[in-house]
Amino acid sequence: MNRNAGLWIDHKVAVIVFAAARSGGTEETKRMDSGMEKHVRFSGHAASEGAAEDRRDHQFDVHLDQYYDEVIAQLHDAKSILIFGPGEAKGEFKKRVEHKGLGERIVGVETTDKMTDNQITAKVRDFYKK
């Protein structure tokens, strides 16, 4: 457990960057797809359709938990984790990490826009150079 990690995450993709251990080293990047389609919540339907919607929401939540757990498994060697990204996924992921007893490793949670892999790597590199 001696690596610093940065994680850009949304509901569809997670990009993990392990910062170089020393100056001039290279970063290791892993990309994970959730297999999740866009989550659409429906409103204004009859009560009989509510059960089907609840079932879809539950399936969505279960799938997200599995996705987050797979990402957490990739971060098991990280001594510190910077979490960033757009939307709700970063906060959900933070709660899942805390639920797994690894919350003390989180060094920051930031809101960012969509980023390229190179931008993500540069952000992580710059964060840990401080």
Image (spheres, helix red, strand yellow):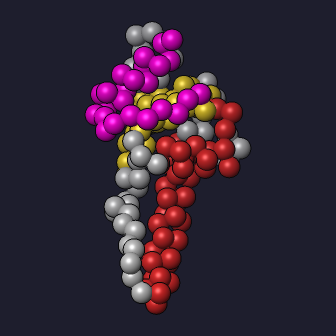
Quarter the N terminus occupies: top right
Span of residues in magenta: 107-130
Tell me which corner region of the image, top left, top right, bottom left or bottom right, holds residue 125.
top left
In the rendered view, does 85 fall on the left or right side of 65? left
User: Residue 109: x percent and y percent?
Assistant: 52, 33
Residue 49, located in which quarter of the rendered image? bottom left
Residue at the extreme right: 101
Residue at 43% across / 31% down in the picture? 17
Q: Position of residue 8 (x, y in %)?
A: 42, 37
Tell me residue 7's x, y (percent). Answer: 46, 36
Q: Nearer the viewer, residue 68 or 1?
A: 68
Q: Is residue 72 above or below residue 20?
A: below
Q: Residue at x 50, y 78 (%)?
A: 55
Figure disc tally: 0
Of residue 116 and residue 86, the one placed in the foreground of this image is 86
- State the image quarter where residue 15 is shown: top left
> What residue lies at 41% left-to-right and 39% top-to-bottom?
85
Is residue 129 rendered magenta in the image?
A: yes
Q: Is residue 32 visible?
A: no
The image position of residue 38, as x and y in percent, is 34, 61
Residue at the bottom extreme of this rendering: 48
Residue drawn where x is 49% and y is 43% of the image: 90
